Image: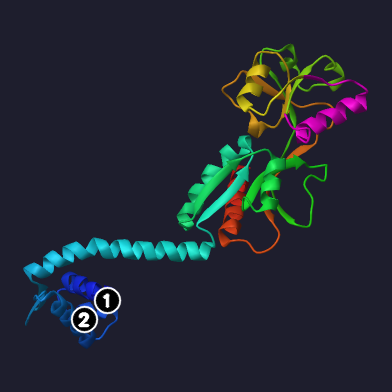
């Protein structure tokens, strides 16, 4: 038995004529007849009855057609999936991302990518420094990272960075804090403020804080080091400290507000990063989708 025989039988059932079935399949009538005879010979049963009005399936032909139709559908679906994944260049696309922005962009990007290809996406959550390491090591195909727009950030001839958007750094404070009534904050008045910092010394916002305090000749006080966004928001909401962040990273469920500073804090630039060189087509598709999503949201 062959798939062509199954398709011919189903076409005859659908069109009720050998001629119309042949036209639908772009076959000649002799080819349709050949496939039907071969299938009937294999099964040892008549599957199609022919008369002057056309052709119809016998009772056994109908039974067999009902059984093979879903099988043929699954085979065709499997064939399409293989072709899509072949064109995508990967069965599983691994992407590294930092949590605050990843949760806002990656799910929507995955949904759109799945509409274009059957490729699966595996997300690895990590800080930008670790994401870059994973990209360079080939452990992920691509990643979302961020750095301060006024600093070199992650450089290297082995990386390709596609800038998605930038947003200014702001000071995150408790909504009930006296500082919340001010339109902007002066770091000279924040000498006693305690800051929630990252566990990594390479964190972009921490580098900004150190730069600003050094320029003012003031020491910077640390309250805690953590990368847990809920912990950061909770500490700030209770008035225990401040944090440096951007509007996209703020969780509206906490009683916190953002305020700009009189000092230049720079901007956080979010980029899509890959290794230089040949990449699966799905990597390029994901980059294009992320560009489109961020452009719409801006």
**In the displayed structure, does residue 41 sit left or right of residue 209?**
left
214, above or below 179, in the image:
below
- The percent coordinates of residue 129 (x first, y second) are 72, 41
- Secondary structure at badge 2 equals helix
Instruction: Please tell me whether residue 218 belongs to the stretch shown in magenta.
Output: yes
For the residues labelled 2 and 1, say whether their Cβ atoms are less than 8 Å apart. yes
Identify the image quadrant of residue 218. Answer: top right
153, above or below 219, in the image:
below
Instruction: Please tell me whether residue 250 belongs to the stretch shown in magenta.
Output: no
Q: How is the image coloured?
A: rainbow
Identified at 45% across, 66% down, the residue is 83
- The percent coordinates of residue 287 (x first, y second) are 61, 53
Residue 56 tag number: none
Residue 4 tag number: 1
- The percent coordinates of residue 14 (x first, y second) are 19, 69
286, above or below 23, in the image:
above
- Determine if residue 160 is in view: yes
Q: Nearer the viewer, residue 68 or 10?
A: 68
Question: Which residue position holds label 2?
Answer: 35
Label 1 neighbourhood size at 10 Å, few (<14), some (14-19), many (20+)?
some
207, above or below 69, in the image:
above
Magenta residues span 199-222
Q: Quadrant of the N terminus?
A: bottom left
């Amino acid at each position: 038995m062959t798939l062509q025989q199954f398709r011919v039988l189903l076409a005859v059932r659908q069109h009720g004529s050998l001629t119309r079935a042949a036209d639908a399949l772009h076959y000649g009538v002799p080819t349709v007849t050949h496939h039907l005879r071969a299938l009937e010979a294999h099964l040892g049963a008549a599957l199609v009855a022919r008369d002057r009005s056309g052709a119809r399936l016998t009772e056994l032909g109908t039974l067999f057609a009902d059984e093979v139709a879903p099988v043929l559908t699954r085979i065709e679906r499997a064939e399409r999936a293989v072709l899509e994944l072949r064109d995508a260049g990967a069965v599983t696309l691994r992407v590294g991302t930092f949590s605050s922005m990843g949760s806002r962009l990656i799910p929507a990007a995955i949904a759109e990518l799945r509409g274009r290809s059957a490729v699966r996406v595996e997300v690895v959550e990590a800080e930008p420094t670790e994401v870059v390491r994973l990209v360079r090591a080939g452990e992920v195909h691509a990643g979302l990272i961020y750095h301060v727009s006024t600093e070199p950030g992650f450089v290297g001839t082995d990386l390709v960075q596609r800038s998605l958007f930038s947003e200014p750094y702001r000071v995150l404070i408790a909504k009930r804090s006296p500082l919340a009534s001010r339109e902007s904050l002066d770091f000279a008045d924040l000498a006693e403020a305690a800051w929630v910092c990252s566990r990594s010394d390479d964190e972009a916002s921490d580098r900004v804080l150190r730069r600003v305090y050094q320029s003012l000749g003031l020491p910077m006080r640390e309250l805690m080091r953590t990368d847990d966004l809920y912990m950061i928001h909770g500490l700030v909401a209770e008035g225990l400290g401040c944090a440096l962040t951007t509007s996209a990273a703020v969780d509206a469920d906490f009683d916190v507000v953002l305020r700009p500073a009189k000092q230049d804090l720079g901007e956080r630039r979010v980029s899509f990063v890959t290794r230089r060189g040949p990449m699966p087509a799905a990597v390029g598709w994901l980059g294009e989708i992320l560009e489109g999503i961020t452009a719409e949201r801006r």
